[in-house]
Amino acid sequence: MNTIADLRSDTVTRPTAAMRAAMMAAPLGDDVFGDDPSVVALQDKLATMLGFEAALFVTSGTQSNLCAILSHCQRGDEYIVGQFAHCYRWEGGGAAVFGSVQPQPLTHQADGTLSLADIAAAIKPDDAHFARTRLLALENTLGGKLIPYDYLVQATELAKAHGLQTHLDGARLFNAATVQATLTGGTVQAEARRIAQSFDSVSVCFSKGLGAPVGSVLCGSRDLIARAHRVRKMAGGGMRQAGILAAAASYALDHHVARLADDHALAKRLAEGLGDIAELVVEPPHSNIVFVDLTETVRPRAEELIAFLKSRQILITGLYRLRFVTHLDVNADDIDRTIAAVHDFFGG
Ligand SMILES: *Cc1c(COP(=O)(O)O)cnc(C)c1O
């Protein structure tokens, strides 16, 4: 048994036995020829579920966002995006490097949204001085936060009123839909579709909380996906018998969406368990990510705490803030052990 509680990311999951069986059983073909039935089935399944004409299986969330941005934009265009959005901050500047597409980053509000006034002010007039503002790219969940549905509608309507395209980095769309379903009483699938339908394109990761080893899917119109298909090829993402991976994603869609609520419950349990430690400021989690800040006096001890937890077989990250992520391979014992270890570190 795996005795390590790996809370660094929901990407660390390993395929379950049942997922591996589905992968082994998948019918395969050469997807560059469009011949892989398992890839086609996954693309059709997600496009139908989210209400799009077409979809494209890609190697990663980063490649998916790159395909989307380079399909919506031309050289010299720009996309409006949050400072902390993955497709601005965490993707090596790919849209600028490969597409000559300039980001226009905006500061987030406390709830993770970009203010409508800031978006409106960032849309450039048609003038030779400016890059052409072409796209608004949002993310949901963002750092584990659910972005309010009403806001998504307002922001995308504002963008459309100015002739902009809209893209959602929904790497964790099903986490967002899971939280939203608890607010509306709808099904997770219906909420995922409702969120997605505000956008011209949506990217979903299968290698995060959904527990597949590899892969993301980009959804959009038939024309957009045809352009994205070309970008994917240029980016070296044309895969051959990729159905062995697509089958894992299909399995995840069928079997691992409903259980995301368990991850969210464990994240809450962790946040509550750490909540009484005076040295910590714990942000109440919406979904499966718990951010924790050390108070001023103990802030220099962040590395020490991470090392201490590691000595207890508990892994977390602390790039900006301490981050604990729950997923398929984390159980209640892991969480209780983590709570106890952090208490031990602070001597209580
Ligand atoms: C992880 C992540 C990605 C990128 O996924 P990779 O598969 O690691 O390239 C994109 N967007 C968001 C919001 C993510 O969390």
Image (tube, rainbow, N blue to C red):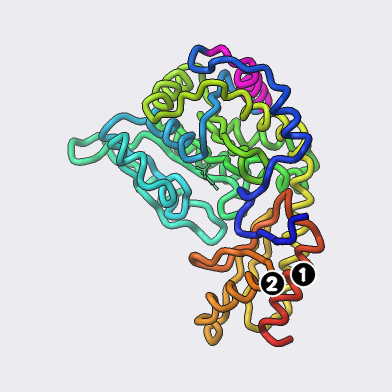
Q: Nearer the N terminus, badge 1 or badge 2?
A: 2
Whether residue 41 appears in magenta in the rendering, the answer is: yes
Label 1 beta carbon less than 8 Å to ligand 1? no
Q: Which mark is residue 337?
A: 1
Q: Residues within 10 Å of mark 1 (few under 14, many from 20)?
A: some
| Residue most extreme to the left | 128
Q: In screen coordinates, is 243 left or right of 85?
A: right
Q: In screen coordinates, is 110 left or right of 346?
A: left
Give the residue displayed 51% in from the left and 29% down from the top.
Answer: 200
Q: Which residue is mark 2?
A: 312
The secondary structure that dominates the magenta segment is: helix
Does dot 1 land on a helix, a strand or a loop?
helix
Q: Quadrant of the C terminus?
A: bottom right
Label 2 beta carbon less than 8 Å to ligand 1? no
Q: Are marks 1 and 2 in contact (CB under 8 Å)?
A: yes
Give the residue displayed 46% in from the left and 36% down from the top.
Answer: 63
For this rendering, which residue is in front, 144 or 4? 4
Q: Residues within 10 Å of mark 2 (few under 14, many from 20)?
A: some
| Residue most extreme to the front | 1
Does dot 2 land on a helix, a strand or a loop?
loop
Residue stretch rendered in magenta on the structure: 34-49
Look at the picture and state if 87 lies above or below 255: below
Q: Quadrant of residue 264?
A: bottom right
Give the residue displayed 63% in from the left and 78% down from the top.
Answer: 280
Give the residue displayed 67% in from the left and 82% down from the top.
Answer: 345
Give the residue type at disc 1: Arg
Whether residue 264 appears in magenta in the rendering, the answer is: no
Give the residue type at disc 2: Arg
Relative image position of residue 170 (x, y in whole percent): 57, 40
Q: Quadrant of residue 28?
A: top right
